[in-house]
Amino acid sequence: MSDLSRRGVAWSLRRRTPFLASTLAFLFATALGWTALSWTAQAEPPSSPEGASSVRDFGAAGDGVRDDTDAVQAAVDRGGAILFPTGRYRLTRTVIVDLAQTSWVSLLGRGTARIIMEGPGPAFRFVGSHTGTADPNSVSPQVWEKERMPLVDGLEIVGNHDEACGLEAVQTMQWTVTRTTVRDAVHALRLFQRNRNVILSECHFYNNRGCGVLLEDVDLHQINVVGCHISYNRGGGVVVRGGYLRNLQISGCDIEFNMGPDAPPTANVLIDSLQAGTGHAEIAIVGCTIQHSVKAPDSANIRFIGRDSSDRYWGNLTIGDNVFSDVARNVEIIAARGVSIVGNTFWGAAEEDLLVVDSQNVVVGPNVFDQNPNYNREGKYRGGVRFHRSRDCTLQGLHLADILGPAIVLEECDGVNVTGCTVRGAQGAAVQLQGVRRGRVSDCLLLSGDARQADGGLPPAIRVQGGSHLQIRGNMTDAETEVSPDAGDVSLGENVRVPPRETVP
C-alpha cells in the first residue's frame, strides 16, 4: 500500500471512530434496556385487563398446593371480569356463580391457568334466573342488567376426584364458553333446566369419564357448538337426553372416540327424545369429522331417536358435509320425521353406513359410501344403506362402492323413490327390495365390478322379494334383475343390460 493510501485509511478511521463508538454505546445501552425490560416482565405478573379483578387479590395462591376455593368464591361474588393469572388453582367444592347476586361475570384464564377440581360436582356452576324464552320480549330487565352473557374463556379444568365435573349452567341467558379445556372429569360441560342462547366455541372437551357436552332434561333453544374438539369422552361426545331442545347447531368440530368398550351403547353424537316430554328438533350437524370407535358395541357416530314419551315423531334434522368412519354404524335415524342427509363421506362401518328405521319423510341426497381398501385390509367394514319400516323417503344421487353385502336395502317400506344412484362392486344385490310397496328404482347405474358370489357368478343388480306396486325402469346394469314369484304388480321397462367389467382399471 502506498504512503498516500495508508494516510487515507488512517484519516478515515480517525474520522469514523467517534461514530463507531457512539453507535456501539447506543447498541449496548439498548441491549441493557431490553434485558432490564425482560427481567421486569419476568419479575412482575401480567397486569389484569382494564376493570378486571385477579383472584390473587382475594388470596388465591395458584401454587397447586393450597386450597383456593374460598378465594375464588370471594372473587366471583364480587362479580365483573375475574382474571386467573398463570398458575394452578385447587378447588375442593363447587364455586357458585349466582348471577342475580354477582351481576355480570367473566372468568378469564388466558390459556395459562389450570383449575384442579378436587371435590364432587362441577368446578363452576352458573345459576341464572331466566324463565323466559329466546324472544327478547320475554327477557326480564334483571337478566339484561345483571345476568346476560356470562363468559368462561381460556381456562383449563382438570378433574382430580371421582365425581369431579367441569362446567354447569342452570337458567342462564347467552352463556358463552370459549377457548376452554376440560379433561379427566366425569362430564366436561352440563346444561340442565332452562337455558337460552348458548355458544360453545374453540373448546377441548377431552378424555372424560362421562360426556363431553351433556344436555340433560334441559329446556333449551339456540345452542351453537362450533370449532370444538370433543374426543375420548367415554359416555358420549354431544349427548341430549330428555328435556326439550330446539335449534342445535354442531359445526366445524372434530368429534371422535367418545365411547368405551365397556360403556353402554352410545354415540359420538346422541340425541334421544324417548324420555322427553317434547322431542328434539331443528338440528343441523354440518362440516364435522365424526369417527371411532368400532370396538365399542352398538356404536354410532350419530344416533337420533325422534319418538318422544307421547309417541310423537320429531326431527327437522339436517346432516351435511361431514366425514364419518370407523364405528358399528355411522348414522342411525330411529323414529324421526323430516330428515335431510346430503354431501357426506361415509366409510368404515362394521354394519350399515346408514340405518333408517320407523321414519318418514327422509331425504338422502348425494353422498359417497366408499369402503376404501386402504382402510379395509382386514375386511372388517361392511357398509351400505338400509331403510326398515319407513315411508315416503327419497334416495337420490348416492354413490356406493365395494360394499361387503347388499348396497341399498329397503325392507317393509312404503313410498320409496330410488333414483340416479351409482353402485359398483357390492358383494350382494346393488338394490334389494323386501316387502316394499309403492316403490320406484330408476335411472341408476348398477355395476358388479369384480364382485362375485360364492358360486363365481355375479350378484344380482336388483333383487325384489315380495311387495307390490313397484316400478323398475331406466337403469343400466351388468347383472340380472331378480323378481320373486310373490311380488305383485312389478313394472320393468327400458332397463339396459351391459357386459360386466371384470376388473377395476
Image (spheres, rainbow, N blue to C red):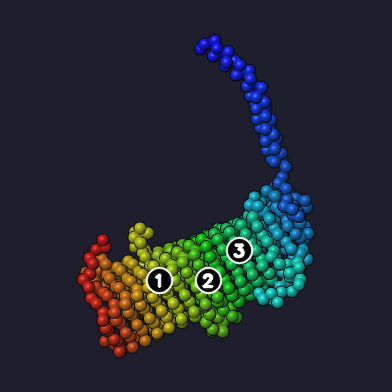
Q: Where does residue 96 sit, x and y in percent of width and height?
A: 73, 63
**Residue 200's mark?**
3
Q: Residues within 10 Å of mark 2 (few under 14, many from 20)?
A: some
Q: Examine the image and state in which quarter residue 241 appears.
A: bottom right
Q: Residue at x 77, y 51 (%)?
A: 57
The amino acid on which the numbered mark 2 sits, given as a three-letter code, is Ala
Marks 1/2: CA–CA distance: 17 Å
Q: Residue at x 56, y 63 (%)?
A: 226
Q: How many marks?
A: 3
Q: Check whether the beta carbons of the residues at disc 1 and disc 3 lie within 8 A of each other.
A: no
Please tell me which residue lies in front, 413 or 470: 470
| Location of residue 86 with respect to 477 vertically, above or below | above
The amino acid on which the numbered mark 1 sits, given as a three-letter code, is Pro
- Outermost residue, top side: 3
Q: Examine the image and state in which quarter residue 157 appears.
A: bottom right
First reached walking from the N terminus: tag 3 or tag 2:
3
The local secondary structure at tag 3 comes to strand
The amino acid on which the numbered mark 3 sits, given as a three-letter code, is Leu
The residue labelled by disc 2 is: 284
The residue labelled by disc 1 is: 366
Q: Residues within 10 Å of mark 1 (few under 14, many from 20)?
A: some
Please tell me which residue lies in front, 97 or 174: 174
- Outermost residue, front side: 4
**Residue 169's mark?**
none
Q: Residue at x 37, y 59 (%)?
A: 375
Please tell me which residue lies in front, 278 or 31: 31
Marks 1/3: CA–CA distance: 30 Å
Q: Quadrant of the C terminus?
A: bottom left
Q: From where the camera sits, is residue 477 visible?
A: yes
Q: Quick check: 76 left or right of 24? A: right
| Location of residue 437 with respect to 121 vertically, above or below | below
The local secondary structure at tag 2 comes to strand
